Structure formats: structure tokens, C-alpha cells
Amino acid sequence: MSKVEQLLKSLNAFIQKAEEDDDEKLTDVVADFPGLESLPKIVEDYEKEIAKLLRNQRKLYLNEIKRFVSKDDKLTLEALLQYFTNNLFAADEFAEELGEVTAEFLQLTVEELCKKMMESIDPDIPFVETSTQTTNWVKDWSTKLADLMQLNTHKAIEEVLTTAIENGDSIQDVELKMKNLPEFDRKRARKTAITEILTASSRAQWESYMQSPAVVKKKWKHSGSKKNQPRENHVAMDGVEVGVDEEFEIEGSGETCQYPRDPSLSAKERVNCHCTMGPVVDESILGLSQEEKEKLRQEALKELNS
């Protein structure tokens, strides 16, 4: 087993253990990360930040209900729904704050993983810098993820209020249902953290393979956890090789991607996917001098930065 394969195997083991032990701290999840001992804490800190933002978001909406009731004890749910959708949703700062936290997490994690991956592929060509393409990807995906999470929360709140109006529920009923919404739950924070460490891992692989002169192709590798039903089309992708700068075409769906869990994929193909990819190395390039390989890396970086 190559060093890269060992790294990916231990990363997958860490994620599976984290999913199976929902109540255990990520820093306590046993995993072997030679040179990456800081990774569990990075992921746990990200989970804690998301959980804090979700708590603050829930507090915002519950406090606004109380404030409205204190101003007018004859407040109707219709008026509350109108206020939420027309005013409070726009003032919600969750997406902006989560976007910043996620960008910091992704950038740090991608860099940490790139260091180890590139060293594992070829010690002569260590990771030095992240390409402009990946830096831009971090910013773009962080914003999209945060906006999507906030939109889903707003939809859930709107549904609580709409259903309450239809059922003739009281303000107290609405408060209780909103307080217990899964969108504010700690489990959502954990699931998000686990999904994004997988996403960062995929992006770090792509970045490492693109920068490593000896990597000429990438190979899809199917894997899954005990909790997941394997997608037959992902099982069929196992062993498929494409050029390092080419896209995989997912069996049956016609969707294409640079790597498993690529954010360009639909949720059907991305969510709960534990597939990985490995490098296909040209041994003749590995045998070149360090100067020759560094020149090739600089050419690749120039293209990635253009």
C-alpha cells in the first residue's frame, strides 16, 4: 500500500468512526494520522463553530417571537410569518458568518492535506502554495454552502409557521417547534463538519495531483461506511481512470466531476458519498532530477494560477 493510500485509508477510518459515534468528540475518535495529528482538532473546532452559529440563529428567532408578543399580545401568526419572511430573514447574518468560518476551515485543511499528499507522492516536490483555482474554489464553495444552509433553515421556519396557521396552533406551540427544529441541532453541525472534511480531502487530492509532475492520471475508488447504502453507479466507477486534468463521468447519471463529492455534482451524487481517488504515477517522471520536476511543477502552477 502506497503512502497516499495509507493516508486516505486512515482519513476514511476517522470519518466512519466519527459518523458511528455521534456523541464522541472528534478529537477522541481514534485514527492514525502520521504527520496530521492536528486534523481531528481542526474538524472538531469547525463543528463547534457551526454549532455556536446555529445556537445563535435559533436564539435570534425565538427572541424575536418573544419581542413581538411583548409588544402586542394579540399578535397573529400571519403577522409573525410576514415579519419573518419580509424582514428578519434578510437580517439573518448566519450565512455571512458561516461562510467566513468555512473558508478558513477549508483553506487550512486543504493545505494540511496537500502537504502530506505531495510528500507521499514525491518527497522531491513538497507542497509550497495553493493554486489560485483552489483559493477561488474555497471562497466560492464556502459562500454557496453557507447560503444553502441558511436557505434550508428559513424554509423550515416558514413551514413551521405556515403549518401552525393551518392547524390553528398557538404562539407557544410555534416556539416549541422552532426550538426543536433539526436545522438548529448539534447533529447538523457534526454532519456538516464531516461532509466538509471529505470535500476538503477531495479538493486536496485534486490540487496535489495537479501540482505533482509524476501524477498523470487519477483513479476512482469506491468506498463506503456501514451506515451508507452503496450507490450502484459509484460501485461501477471503482477503478475508472481519467487524465489528471480530465473529469470523471458518473455511470448512468451523465454528471461529470473532477473528484468524488465535487460541489458541481447534484446532491444525489454527492451527499454521503465516501468514494476517494488515487494517483496514477509515471515512474519515468519520478526518476527525473529534482530540478526537472520542479520546472514541470512550476509550469503546472502557472496554468492553475492563470
Image: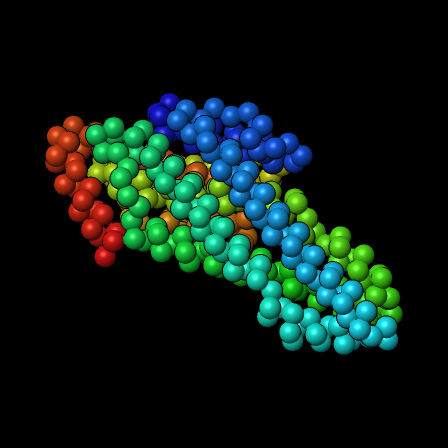
In the displayed structure, 217 sits above or below 266; it is: above
**Quadrant (top left, top right, bottom left, bottom right) of the C terminus:** bottom left
Where residue 213 appears, as percent x and y from the top left, is: 21, 38
Q: Report the front residue among 99 and 273.
A: 99
* Residue 138 x %, y %: 40, 52
Q: Residue at x 31, y 46 (%)?
A: 130
Q: Is residue 55 left or right of residue 131?
A: right
Residue at left 34%, top 50%? 134
Q: Quadrant of residue 84?
A: bottom right
The quarter of the image holding the N terminus is: top left
Which image quadrant for residue 170? bottom right
Residue name at image x 66 percent, y 45 percent: 186
**Residue 86 in view, yes or no:** yes
Q: Is residue 156 left or right of residue 50?
A: right
Asked whether 243 or 131 is in front, the reply is 131
How are the residues colored? rainbow
Residue 129 rendering spot, x and y as whole percentages:
28, 43
- Check the image and report above or below for 145 versus 233: below
The image shows residue 230 at horizontal and vertical percentages of 56, 40
The answer to whether any part of residue 159 appears in the image is: no
Drawn side of residue 289 relative to residue 47, left or right: left
Determine the residue positioned at 65% across, 44% down.
Answer: 187
On screen, residue 166 above or below 280: below
Total marks drawn?
0
Residue placed furthest toward the front: 71
